[in-house]
Image (cartoon, rainbow, N blue to C red):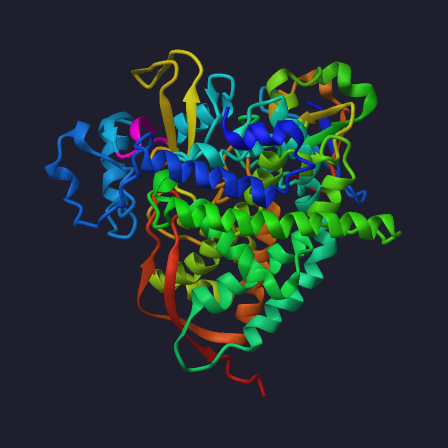
């Protein structure tokens, strides 16, 4: 048992959550100094070789530079064709199986009894002291209870209420963009819009909304968890700050509700009004984990689809022409953007028993990584998968939201945000031009852009 | 040769011809019935072909299986006769069946 658990059980109400995390951080530092832990090494970028020069067993798709160096398509294609269920025995994250074909991914995702989501859903791990608990990394029945408590916040009924607000904000952001001059789309549009959305979902102080983005990037971007840039010390400090803000928010909301304020549709209110979660604040690891899950879920994913859509239409300019002549294709295009981008490359499971899959025997306890990014390019399931086709038939049948009990809870909200963005873009701009090459995030999990310069031209006036 | 009627949340009715051996989801998709998304293509893995079978007809369709229940459990509009249309295979005995569509597919 680690110290956070211990303190939590002895009397979480007595020890403030930020103090508990600070204590955990000290313990982590002490253990590292004493050599009980070895510091997880930093990833250093080196040119990734052509996949055809490698022996099949040497292919390691956990390399966090695979996407940035544009090698991911050829690496995954070789695995799909030659070894669709592939074992890599010494990656930086330990041994793992890669599942790369659409049908096999569907099988793993559906069979949660054979493939557990605990303790982590990314290829690596978080420091033991920060083993927060989130329902995406829980199996039924606990998963079901916690998910049910919060899913109302992004349920279609709630979204109907939110649509007007989302449109108003989208207009506000787009109307402030410069014309005929390059700007960073990632910063000014994708991050700005998603941070506004997150602040609304949590009823978080609006002026501090970029903090949500920072925490989310921290939580999803550790070297040890996904091959990212962040180190553990920064992660601990960020989580202390996050727990401080979220505890304060929790108590304020509770006080306001007690004073008779009309309950909102936000996440904290939902948690406080559900019997299973009304005392979640006393279970700090679950409290933090589930809030972190919601902000991570609504951050990188939608952000990178907002950027990816613009990039895709620049790579496939005929599709932009098609879109302008028939804006009713937007809804279908949104699904195609989410497939083409696949903002999260993978989800990880652990086999609960020996399983035969496509000719391989996965042993009980083995780590199994479903590569959605590969399944969404599987020629066996998707026609011309490398092409971006806005009127693609069955565009909804992509893997980006996952399938089974862990299927993305915010899928409808994501689609709504993207649809409104494109409706408002088409109403304003004639050209949306990507200038130069985008810059990519270092990660084997998030398929994202850190920077993309864009230049806009206004629509000619219709007079 | 019989027919099945899908009724949208706001009341629009769509009567479609039964094709035995096909799933109700497939029949609805083939006939352009709105309100069914079928994101996973018929694997009971997404929950977006949720229908509520009209009370009297649940004996003809049978009840939801375990796998199906897991997905239905996540839908807010869930009712006692909720089913995933992809898991109901049409038979001639379903002539006259009525299936209500929820307001939203999750």
Residue A445: image quadrant is top left
Question: Could you say where residue A453 lies in the image, as x and y percent from the top left?
Answer: 37, 70
Judged left or right of residue A418, residue A446 is: left
Quick check: A354 above or below A11? above
Position of A355 relative to A199 (above/below)? above
The majority secondary structure of the magenta stretch comes to strand
Magenta span includes A262: no
- In the rendered image, residue A312, in percent from the top left (x then y), is placed at 38, 58
Q: Would residue A214 be seen by someone viewing this image from the given angle?
A: yes
Expressed as whole percent of the image width and height from the top left, the position of residue A111 reads: 49, 21
Question: Of residues A231 and A177, which is closer to you in this image?
Answer: A231
Residue at the farthest left position: A53
Position of A205 with respect to A404 (left or right) is right
Residue drawn 51% across the image and 77% down it: A177
Q: In terms of depth relative to the viewer, which is nearer, A109 or A222?
A: A222
Residue A100 falls inside the magenta stretch: yes
Q: Quadrant of residue B75?
A: top right
**Residue under the point 54% across and 61% down:** A210
Q: Which residues are magenta?
A: A92-101
Quarter of the picture containing the C terminus of chain B is top right
Which residue is drawn at the image coordinates 18% and 27% (left, top)? A57
A423 or A447: nearer the viewer = A447
Which picture quadrant has residue A381?
Answer: top left
């Amino acid at each position: 048992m680690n110290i956070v658990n211990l303190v939590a059980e002895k009397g979480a109400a007595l020890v403030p959550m930020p103090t508990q995390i600070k204590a955990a951080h000290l313990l982590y530092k002490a253990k590292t100094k004493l050599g009980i832990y070895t510091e997880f090494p930093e990833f250093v970028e080196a040119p990734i070789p052509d996949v055809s020069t490698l022996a099949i067993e040497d292919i390691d798709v956990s390399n966090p530079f695979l996407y940035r160096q544009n090698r991911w398509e050829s690496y995954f294609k070789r695995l799909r064709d030659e070894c669709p269920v592939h074992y890599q025995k010494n990656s930086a994250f330990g041994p793992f199986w890669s599942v790369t074909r659409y049908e096999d991914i569907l099988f793993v995702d559906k069979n949660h009894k054979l493939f557990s989501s605990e303790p982590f859903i990314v290829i690596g791990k978080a420091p033991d002291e920060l083993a927060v608990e989130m329902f995406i990394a829980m199996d039924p029945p606990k998963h079901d209870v916690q998910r049910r408590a919060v899913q109302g916040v992004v349920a279609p009924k709630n979204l109907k209420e939110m649509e007007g607000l989302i449109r108003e904000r989208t207009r506000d952001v787009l109307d402030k963009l410069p014309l005929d001059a390059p700007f960073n789309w990632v910063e000014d549009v994708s991050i700005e819009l998603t941070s506004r959305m997150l602040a609304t979902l949590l009823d978080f102080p609006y002026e501090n909304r970029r903090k949500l983005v920072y925490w989310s990037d921290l939580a999803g971007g550790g070297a040890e968890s996904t091959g990212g840039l962040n180190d553990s010390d920064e992660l601990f400090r960020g989580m202390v700050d996050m727990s401080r803000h979220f505890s304060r928010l929790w108590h304020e909301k509770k006080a306001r509700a007690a004073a008779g304020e009309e309950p909102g549709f936000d996440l904290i209110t939902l948690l406080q009004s559900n019997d299973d979660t009304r005392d979640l604040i006393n279970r700090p690891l679950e409290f933090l984990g589930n809030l972190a899950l919601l902000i991570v879920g609504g951050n990188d994913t939608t952000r990178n689809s907002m950027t990816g859509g613009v990039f895709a239409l620049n790579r496939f300019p005929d599709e932009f022409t098609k879109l302008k002549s028939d804006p009713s294709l937007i809804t279908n295009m949104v699904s195609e953007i989410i497939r083409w981008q696949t903002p999260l490359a993978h989800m990880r499971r652990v086999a609960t028993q020996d399983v035969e899959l496509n000719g391989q025997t996965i042993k009980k306890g083995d780590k199994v990584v479903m590569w959605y990014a590969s399944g969404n390019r599987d020629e066996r399931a998707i026609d011309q998968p490398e092409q971006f086709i806005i009127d693609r038939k069955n565009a909804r049948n992509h893997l980006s939201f996952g399938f089974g009990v862990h299927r993305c809870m915010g899928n409808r909200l994501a689609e709504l945000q993207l649809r409104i963005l494109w409706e408002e873009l088409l109403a304003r701009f004639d050209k949306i031009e990507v200038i130069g090459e985008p810059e990519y995030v270092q990660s084997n999990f998030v398929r994202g852009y850190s920077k993309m310069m864009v230049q806009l031209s206004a629509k000619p006036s219709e007079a | 040769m019989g027919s099945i009627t899908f009724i949208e949340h706001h009341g629009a009715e769509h009567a479609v011809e039964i094709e035995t051996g096909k799933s109700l989801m497939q029949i609805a998709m083939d006939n352009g019935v709105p309100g069914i998304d079928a994101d996973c293509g018929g694997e009971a893995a997404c929950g977006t072909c949720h229908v509520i079978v009209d009370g009297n007809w649940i004996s003809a369709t049978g009840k939801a299986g375990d796998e199906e229940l897991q997905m239905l459990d996540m839908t807010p509009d869930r009712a006692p006769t909720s089913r995933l249309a992809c898991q109901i295979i049409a038979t001639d005995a379903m002539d006259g069946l009525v299936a209500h569509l929820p307001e939203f597919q999750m």
